[in-house]
Amino acid sequence: MADSHSSFRPALLVVDMQEDFCPPSGSLAVPQGRTITPLINTLLALPTFSLKIATQDWHPPTHISFASNHNHSHSSPPKLPFVDTHTIHNPLNPSQSYTTLLWPDHCIQSTPGASLLPELLLSHFDHIIKKGTDPRVEMYSAFFDPFPPTPDGKRVCDSGLAKLLHEKDITHVYVVGLAGDYCVKHTAYDAAREGFQTVIIEEGTKSVNPGGWEECKKEMESLGGVRVVSVESEEVQ
Ligand code: VGL
Ligand code: ZN
């Protein structure tokens, strides 16, 4: 007989559905990013989810991920967003580093580009979690910065999402939103690592690089312990 902790308490996690990640005006617009809103609204209106959470990329203007913040030197060629990479060192342990793409300025705190899409059923969210607030680190995951915790358990960034999901006895995490190949992927990896049965609903996400999605799916399923399901062809639970 299942007790309440082994029962099905699913959370819906809606990642970064913000103006800057969407056409027509987003500075980092994900192709077709806006088109997933009706499906997300359908999910938000279901009685299924015990907890519904939106995340919001929320950067200070000095954020390390902006190419513009790496172009102060006149002696070197400018760094190009979407093209050039940079290496970020762990502020708590500089021997650890992480290399990733540079981006255009996006989701700057309190600007119109950082706002959640107005056509989302915003009143259905129980919580809104802000991420990427520390200028020193890239944070694709809605949970943590990408570096491992120190031996005494310290992290550069912890959004509080893991604690919230554990406190609410969540068993399954269903992830949708933007971008499939960045924040959705890394959020799903951390959800799985935190012990939640983690599912990405395929029609509920779009990627920065749509051509890489098939490869990205394989990697998430084989390395990340994340299930990717299609609402058209599979049971979602
Ligand atoms: C994201 C790039 C930079 C995302 C956030 O939400 O996927 N991508 N910041
Ligand atoms: Zn960002």
Image (cartoon, rainbow, N blue to C red):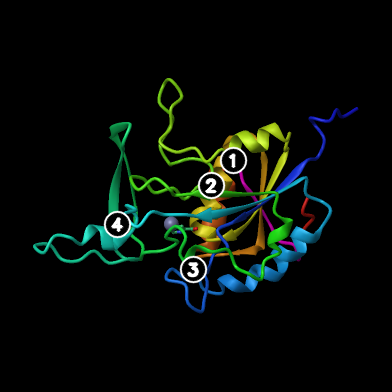
Whether residues under marks 1 and 2 lie with C-beta atoms below 8 angstroms apart, the answer is yes
Q: CA distance from mark 3 to mark 4?
A: 27 Å
Whether residues under marks 1 and 4 lie with C-beta atoms below 8 angstroms apart, the answer is no
**Residue lying at the far front of the rendered structure:** 110
Q: Residue at x 41, y 63 (%)?
A: 106
Q: CA distance from mark 4 to mark 2?
A: 21 Å
Q: CA distance from mark 2 to mark 3?
A: 21 Å
How many numbered tags mark residues here? 4
Question: Who comes first in sequence, dot 2 or dot 3?
Answer: 3
**Residue lying at the far left of the rendered structure:** 75
Q: Residue at x 43, y 68 (%)?
A: 28
Question: Who comes first in sequence, dot 1 or dot 2?
Answer: 2
Give the residue pinned by disc 4.
Answer: 85
Give the residue pinned by disc 1.
Answer: 161
143 shown above or below 33: above
Q: Residue at x 28, y 48 (%)?
A: 87
Q: Residues within 10 Å of mark 4 (few under 14, many from 20)?
A: some
34 shown above or below 173: below
Q: Quadrant of the N terminus?
A: top right
Q: Residues within 10 Å of mark 1 (few under 14, many from 20)?
A: many
The label on residue 112 is 3
Instruction: Check residue 108 for magenta coloring.
Output: no
